[in-house]
Image: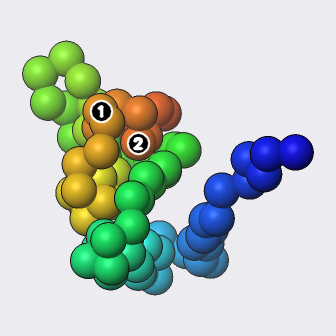
Amino acid sequence: MLNTCLPGFFITGTDTGVGKTHVAAKIAAALRRAGRRVGVYKPVASGCIRSGTTLVSDDAVALWQAAGEPGEIGAVCPQCFQAR
């Protein structure tokens, strides 16, 4: 039987601004330097910035760049919401 379970990390915190993205980006960058393939995912982001017709999360961009920009940025954070 093929083992399809991929190793991973789940970074969580209790509030905005506690460093979740910073820590996750540091881990992703360190894994890349060690020669590992890295994927990142931020399921939901609020306070996103409008770029043309798209909303973009600064956190998602930071994670995506730390991971070596795999795939499309839109797949990193599929649910972006603008602050009001």
Picture coordinates of residue 4 (x, y %)? 74, 47
Q: Is residue 50 visible?
A: yes
Picture coordinates of residue 30 (x, y %)? 32, 81
Which image quarter: residue 26? Answer: bottom left
- Residue occupied by mark 1: 72
Give the colour scheme of this rendering: rainbow
Question: What SS does tag 1 mark?
Answer: loop
- Residue at left offset 40%, top offset 59%: 38
- Residue occupied by mark 2: 76
Q: Residues within 10 Å of mark 2 (few under 14, many from 20)?
A: many
Residue type at mark 2: give it.
Val
Residue type at mark 1: give it.
Glu
In the drawing, does residue 43 fall left or right of residue 83? right
Which image quadrant: the C terminus?
Answer: top left
Residue at the far right in the pictured view: 1
In the drawing, does residue 4 fall left or right of residue 18? right
